[in-house]
Amino acid sequence: MRKFVHALLLLTCGIFAAALLLAQTTAQQSNDLRVFVRPLEGSDAELAKSVGKKLIHELEKHSISVTESKDDADAILTGSGLMQTSRKHSYGSHPAVCIRGSVRLVNKNGVTLWTEDVSSSRYAVNETSSFVDRVTDGVAKALSEESKRRSSEPVAQIDRR
């Protein structure tokens, strides 16, 4: 049993280290693109505003450039959602809160880079952080792919007649 626990612990550490390395690599590849975060919409305006601010902070924390101007952005992040309370998964006397939203990242040409229905983990200690983490991961991966795509495009030829 002890060997099993040690093996499980080593496996968990390995997975965590690989995930951390992937997150750092993804952030480094996507940090040359700028994102404009459109104010989030939702049934609870204060919650939407709070989640939007937290999202901008988390994106910047992951080396993703956030711009205040839509015109300066390489991509635009939009989202709308709602906050639900559920007695089904409540802990103690407090009902569990779930944040759910649809998010979309499009480039300047209107091409969708990433879209997903995101929800906070039902086991999260902080529901807004769980939601924001999931959105940040999706945006980082999409920007990384966009950056790779852009870097593999041939440079425009200059016509010298």
Image: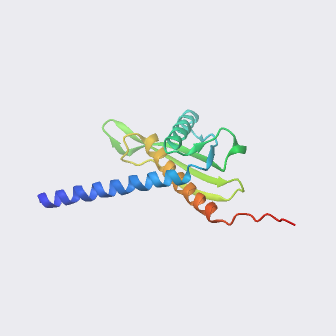
Q: Where residue 119 sits in the image (x, y, percent)?
A: 47, 50
Q: Residue at x 39, y 55 (%)?
A: 19
Q: Residue at x 70, y 44 (%)?
A: 72
Q: Where residue 17 sits in the image (x, y, percent)?
A: 34, 54
- Is 100 located above or below residue 161 in the figure? above
Q: Residue furthest front?
A: 161
In the image, 26: left or right of 123?
right
Please name whichever residue, 47 or 24, is drawn nearer the observer in this view of the structure.
24
In the image, 8: left or right of 42?
left
Q: Where residue 49 sits in the image (x, y, percent)?
A: 57, 35
- In this orientation, does residue 70 appear? yes
Please name whichever residue, 52 or 36, is drawn nearer the observer in this view of the structure.
36
In the image, 24: left or right of 68?
left
Screen quadrant of the C terminus: bottom right
- Is 48 located above or below residue 74 in the figure? above
- In this orientation, does residue 118 appear? no
Please name whichever residue, 64 or 98, is drawn nearer the observer in this view of the structure.
64
Screen quadrant of the N terminus: bottom left
How many labels sit on residues?
0
Please name whichever residue, 22 or 86, is drawn nearer the observer in this view of the structure.
22
In the image, 129: left or right of 102?
left
Q: Where residue 116 sits in the image (x, y, percent)?
A: 55, 56
Q: Residue furthest left?
A: 1
What colour scheme has been applied to the protein in the rendered image?
rainbow
Q: Residue at x 52, y 45 (%)?
A: 63
Instruction: Please tell me in which quadrant of the rendered image residue 85 appears.
Output: top left
Q: Residue furthest right?
A: 161
